Image (cartoon, rainbow, N blue to C red):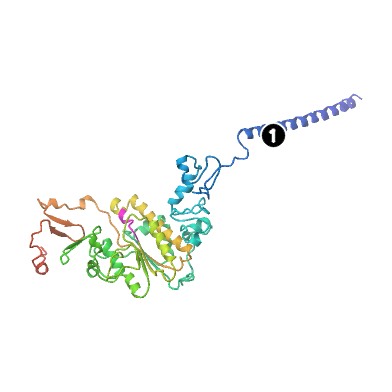
Amino acid sequence: MDSRLALATEEPIKKDSLKKYKILCVVLLALLVIVSLGLGLGLGLRKPEEQGSCRKKCFDSSHRGLEGCRCDSGCTGRGDCCWDFEDTCVKSTQIWTCNLFRCGENRLETALCSCADDCLQRKDCCADYKTVCQGESPWVTEACASSQEPQCPPGFDLPPVILFSMDGFRAEYLQTWSTLLPNINKLKTCGIHSKYMRAMYPTKTFPNHYTIVTGLYPESHGIIDNNMYDVHLNKNFSLSSVEKSNPAWWSGQPIWLTAMYQGLKAACYYWPGSDVAVNGSFPTIYRNYSNSVPYERRITTLLQWLDLPKADRPSFYTIYVEEPDSAGHSSGPVSAGVIKALQSVDNAFGMLMEGLKQRNLHNCVNIIVLADHGMDQTSCDRVEYMTDYFPKINFYMYQGPAPRIRTRNIPQDFFTFNSEEIVRNLSVSPF
């Protein structure tokens, strides 16, 4: 009897405790939700306030955004530019590439190239527009073309030829630093290449570049050095003198003239001799040399020449870049400076290939990439000083592989004697 009573009284107690427990859980859950909402509101986890941006509004004077957020050219003076005005509107006009923020931009008339939606129609897109803004794969990551025949778009009946020179690019760089040169290495992998090219003597920029386009030795085409004196002309030739443009120094027939004689057009964005009236003629299109023009400008201009109407479009092109030669002379052929220069050259070549791909010309054009000469390391203990041999220096020494000495004080009758006869009578003693 007692056991039944105990069992009967225990049952209501358990039910009551369970009910209280459920109520307590509900209360705690409600408190947790309230605390979470309070913390969320306190920490700012609310719908964000609208932020002003200059995207697609650059230099639009009619745009009236949020207070203190303008994108017109006068906002800097007023101090009410949007937070991204500098990056979106100013820096975008100073770069040669697209980025996701630039894609679909309002047309920036002062920009170096465009990423606007209509740039393909207006033919002023940045070279990487399709890659960045339309999701196409870059040229450098694509597989090599399988067809051996040129794949040219309509209007290109004859595949153009582009001759691309990198001054001072020695053959060893293709092995030592190939991983730093993805674009040049891609061309090497997909195309035909030689292990090296033997430069002409002397291994200087002007003699070798002119040999490349004429097929002649320096002794035949006349450009025997970067700096030289001619007894017949009684004039000095140097890279910085106006005499460099005198056609009297330049013999032979450069390849751009050969193309023109065949009824084709030629365009040269720099090449030794291309800004000289050789045989009385310049290339169809050419530029007077200036080392201050960035590589991107040179590439962009060449691509614009390819965009010309068929009747005006050249079939042969040259383009020249000064590196890595300049860096090699400054820092040595194996140096951090040369690595940086090589990467800039590779980027320029990659820009060219991206621009060609954007025009569907990357499997159409014939591209020849080469160098005029290489470079070797030197040191102070290999330098000879004339003061060690002559107590008084009264002559000029001209730089170059061959010794060339000229008197400093030229007598009045200096040019009256028969210099060629003297040379013929010279003899060399083996002892």
- In the rendered view, tell whether residue 386 sits above or below residue 5: below
Q: Which residue is tagged 1?
A: 33
Please state which amino acid type lies under the numbered disc 1. Answer: Val
Measured as percent of width and height from the top left, residue 130 is found at: 51, 59
- Give the quarter of the image for residue 50: top right
Measured as percent of width and height from the top left, residue 339 is found at: 36, 52
In this picture, residue 174 sits left or right of residue 377: right
Badge 1 marks a residue whose secondary structure is: helix
Q: For this rendering, which residue is in front, 284 or 360?
A: 284
In this view, which residue lies farthest toward the top? 2
Measured as percent of width and height from the top left, residue 307 is found at: 44, 65
In this view, which residue lies farthest toward the front? 62
Q: Which residues are magenta?
A: 320-326
* Quadrant (top left, top right, bottom left, bottom right) of the N terminus: top right
In this picture, residue 237 sits left or right of residue 178: left
* Quadrant (top left, top right, bottom left, bottom right) of the C terminus: bottom left
Q: For this rendering, which residue is in front, 180 or 73?
A: 73
Q: For this rendering, which residue is in front, 92 or 168?
A: 92
The number of numbered discs placed on residues in the rendered structure image is 1
Name the residue rendered at 42%, 61% in the picture.
352
